[in-house]
Structures are given as structure tokens and as C-alpha cells.
Image (cartoon, grey):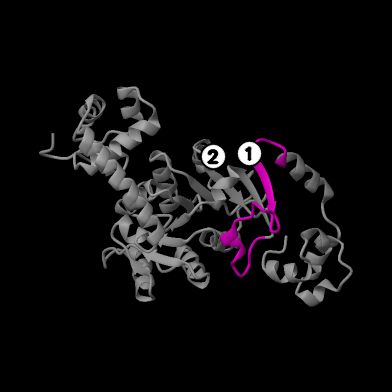
Amino acid sequence: MVFRLGKKLLEFFPNIEELFFADVDLAKLGLSAEEISKLRNPDWQMVEQDLCWAEQTNHHIITFNDADYPKLLKEIQTPPLILFVIGDLQLLKSSQIAMVGSRNPTPIGIETAFNFSQELVKADLVITSGLATGIDAASHRGAIEAFGKTIAVMGTGLNRVYPQTHVTLAEKIVDSGGVLLSEFPRAAGSKAWHFPLRNRIISGLSIGTLVVEATMRSGSLITARFAGEQGREVFAVPGSIYNSRAQGCHYLIRQGAKLVEQPMDVLEEFPDLIKKIKAQIMETKCSVKKNKLDCKHKKLLDCIGFEITTVDILVTRINLPASQVVIMLLELELQGLIKTVMGGYIRILNKT
């Protein structure tokens, strides 16, 4: 598939199918001889296999002209002509925040990505990232553990998860209601030039891009640049001047990215989201004030100590649905009784 000329080709061929049978000199449109040959002689066996694959549950192939093609992604300069998707298509229409950063972050970088992700999904945002090690993985996991949704845009085909150590994470993303997405053929492996292409999709799907930690050579700076070119918000978390993994974030801040220290710094750039969150918080506060701590809340609070307790453990201990436990935890947090930390919740000192 021709990745670099998508929008230009669509100007000549409104329907992608016409491209394969066009009676024009494709070389004049900028296609190489190899690209023209592949278009004139497609691998029909692979096409048939793809169509069979798309018949499976939660498997989808979306072309640029389809109603399910993400609206924001259509707006970028070089939108992909085709997307292979595993998961809930409706999620692609949700408001998304891209979270990216170093593949070799510091422990505080991992914790920051995890915590930001958990808080942002509570605001009904979907976390979009690239399934890479480090910040990407922490962002995906934070969303999942907070019972939110996350989208992984892959730099390989959907049949070839990279890195292989993230096969289980990819499965968890789909099982939790998230999405795996790629513009590459399903069997495509990992190639260096795939990842900058993937990065434009990560930013293109999102209303803003948050860079948590990045060196000056980090690919996440490419994602941030794409976001800026696409007219989207760019956010960066500052760090120590002695941390090389903070230098990329400091560079972005000097270039005009918004410095963020807490999730609300991101959310306040989107007034509609803030209104929704304030309404939810007021409703929850009224509920908490009215009911104070009922038996269920007291039982849940008793299950949380000064060491980290995961949501899964709390669900088991209190024997209530996970969705209900998450709401109760938010209510306890609003009362200042507990605090969200990486991996779960802890009791706040001097609070009973």
C-alpha cells in the first residue's frame, strides 16, 4: 500500500477500488515502478485471506471512505487508506489522548505515565499509544487497571505483535474493550520506517499528545511534531535537568508545548470535558455528602491499608462488581480518605 501519497491519490480516485484499475499514468502521480506493479498486479490470494479474516468476530477492515473511518484521522495530511482493526470500532469515535515517551524510562516516568493514564480515563478519555516498551506500556496498563479503554496503534501487522513480550498486553487491551489498529498488512513484521508512519496515526486519532519522558532522539518527539502539524494540542511532563530522558520534554516545552504536572493540566485545555467532569464530581459529592459512609463504603475503606492494594484484590475482598467498586473508590478519594497510586490505592494517614 502507498503510505506517502494517500490524500493525493484520493483526489484522483475518490473510490479506492478505482485505483487498482485506473487507466492513467500513475508515475505522474508520484508512484514508483514497484508501487505501480503492485497496484496493477495485486496479491489476490492475500486479499481473499484478509476478507476471510474480517469475517471473524471483532475483526474489521476500514477504508478511507467508510463511515467507520475516524473523523480526526481523515483530517491529517497523509491519512492511511486502509486500517486493520481488532476490537470495538465505536471506540475510534471517542475522544482520545495520545500518551508516548521513552522505551527506557525511569521508574518515576513509568509511575507518571501509569497515574496520568488512570486519571485521564476517569474523564472518559481513551488512551492511545503505540504498544512499545516503557511509557507506551505503562499508559496502556494504567487505562486497563482503571477499567478504562485504550487503543494500541501498531508498527507491525496485527498478526505480528512487537515486541513479542507484549502479546499478553495486546490481548488484555482487546479483552478490556480496547482496540488494536494497524495500517500495515497483517503479516508485516517490524521495520524501522514503520514507526514514524505509525506515530502520525497515534497523534492523528487524538485531540492531544502527551509526552511523559523522552530523550532528544526519542521517536515520541516525532509524534509530538505530527500533533503540532495536525493542529492538535501538545503536552510535556518536565523532569530533572540531570535526567537525559527529560531533555526531549524540555525541548518541547521551549517550542510551545504545555508544561503539565497533573492530569487536570491536560483536561483544562478541553472546556467541554471539564464541564462534564465538574458535573460528575458535583453529582458524586452530593451523593457522598447525603449518604456519608454507608456500610459498603466502610467495608471497602477497611480493605485498604497503607500499602498498595490493587482494584482486583478489592473486588475480591468486597465481593461487588468491578464497575461499582471503581465508583466507590472515586467517592472515597473525593473525601480525602484514599489516594490513587501506581498499582492501586492506599489509605491516607490520619484519615479514618
Query: What's the mark number on residue 246?
Result: none
Residue 187 visible in the displayed image: no
Decide whether residue 59 is among the magenta residues.
yes
Q: Secondary structure at mark 1?
A: loop
In the image, residue 4 lies at what x, y percent? 67, 68
Q: Residue at x 67, y 64 (%)?
A: 3
Q: Residue at x 34, y 61 (%)?
A: 268
> Residue 81 falls in which quadrant of the image?
bottom right
* Label whose residue precedes the other's in the sequence (1 or 2): 1
- In this orientation, which residue lies closer to the viewer: 242 or 131? 131
Q: Are marks 1 and 2 in contact (CB under 8 Å)?
A: yes
Q: Crowding near pointer 1: few (<14 within 10 Å), some, many (20+)?
A: some
How many marks overall? 2
Query: What segment is highlighted magenta in the picture?
Result: 54-80
Q: Residue at x 13, y 39 (%)?
A: 349
Residue 337 visible in the displayed image: yes
- Determine whether, in the image, residue 294 is placed left or right of residue 111: left
Q: Residue at x 49, y 40 (%)?
A: 169
Q: Main secondary structure of the magenta part?
A: loop
In the image, residue 223 lies at what x, y percent? 49, 64
- Determine whether, in the image, residue 329 is placed left or right of residue 222: left
Say if 174 sits above or below 29 in the image. Answer: above
Give the residue type at disc 1. Asn
Query: What's the mark number on residue 58?
Result: 1
Residue on which disc 2 sits: 174
Give the residue type at disc 2. Val
